[in-house]
Image: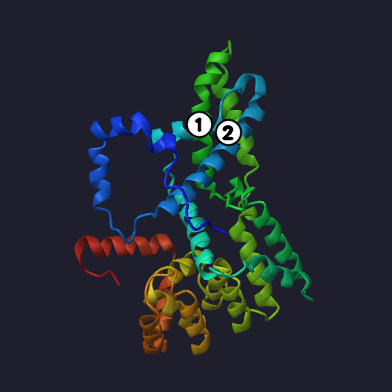
Amino acid sequence: MVPVEWPIATAEKAGGRHAACVAVSGRLRVVRADFFLDSQARLTEQERALMTAMLSDLVAGLTDEFVILLGAAEAANDDGGQMFDRLWKAGLLDIPDLIHLLLRRAEEERVAAGILSGRAAGGSRFLQLFVGDEDPGVSADAMALILARGRRRDRFDGPKILFDDLSAEAAVTLVHAIAAGLRGNLVRRLEGGDADERLATAARTLLSRHDEGNRLEARLFDVVHALERSGQLDDGMIRSALDAGEISMLAEALGRRAGIEFDTAWESVLGGSSSLALLLRMSGASRMLAGEIVAGTSDVLPGDPESAMAAFDRLGDEEVEAARKWLRLDPAFRSAIWALDSDDGHPSV
């Protein structure tokens, strides 16, 4: 459960004489950029704190893995926290796929906490019901998801991301950034000139352990796929997921029924009244179920219930099918089309 109030920043990051020095020297450029950002798109302090904590933990864990591979005696004192600060200042943690993942996990926590506000968390009990399912595939996949989620909570029950959760591209970029961060200390400790080769070998070893098939999203996909095979991906299951605050499973289930990918469905859930209404129509949700989802998420998702239900009623079958075809296109293709449209002012399609 996400705490109601989170600290805005740590003292060493935002307080004392260092902060004052920043304010009178090089702060104006950053303040100007921050001041004119869209207030609706900016990170909340809670999201920023959670994303920072998850990223710091990931960097520290991978740094420890490097330490083990290189030998403790040679890599001693390469603290994960120090590594995080170095990579942050160098801009090496600005990896699009990684930031996208951090944001989604933070949003999942926020939305789930909002749905369950004033109620006991029910996600684990919801999944445990499927562990005892008669279908062995459903049972096994539900247990795998429960275990995977357990590995992604810290001792305070805060969310974590694991190395396997990264895309292959993000994993390669982050691992080599950490290797570069370790290089200076390793060069000083080795008499020979083989520091680069040892770091490269350690990076290859670490990357060989990366398995996208172990992503949390892959486990979620497996459960929903098993439920679909067993004929249980119905309105009742989706309603139960909503009641349990299982927002990611809700998005996966609606996306599966709509025939679109999880990332696209997730963006539709958080995209406002019209996009949520469209997803509900594409998924074949009944008007009653649509109303329950809209009402149950009205306090934590953008838009308003009246607009969402009006859009749900207004959408025609041809419009829904046209949208489905569009959303099934590769995201990179869709992004390129939108970029061209906005560049010359003339629609490409």
Residue annotated with mark 2: 63
Label 2: which secondary element: helix
| Mark 2 / mark 1, whichever is N-terminal | 2
Identify which residue is drawn at 31% across, 64% down: 338
Q: Are marks 2 and 1 in contact (CB under 8 Å)?
A: yes
Give the Cα separation between the discs numbered 2 and 1. Answer: 8 Å
Label 1: which secondary element: helix
Q: Position of residue 236 (x, y in %)?
A: 62, 83
Amino acid found under the numbered disc labelled 1: Met
Amino acid found under the numbered disc labelled 2: Thr
Choose top left, top right, bottom left or bottom right for residue 207. top right
| Along the line of sight, the residue nearer the viewer: 258 or 243 | 243
Residue annotated with mark 1: 83
Identify which residue is drawn at 23% across, 39% down: 28
Q: Position of residue 290 (x, y in %)?
A: 49, 83
Q: Position of residue 220 (x, y in %)?
A: 62, 64
Residue at the far top: name it: 191
Q: In the drawing, does residue 135 fall left or right of residue 23?
A: right
Label 1 packing within 10 angstroms: few (<14), some (14-19), many (20+): some
Label 2 packing within 10 angstroms: few (<14), some (14-19), many (20+): many
57 over 234 or under it: above or below: above
| Along the line of sight, the residue nearer the viewer: 30 or 211 | 30
Identify which residue is drawn at 51% across, 45% down: 53
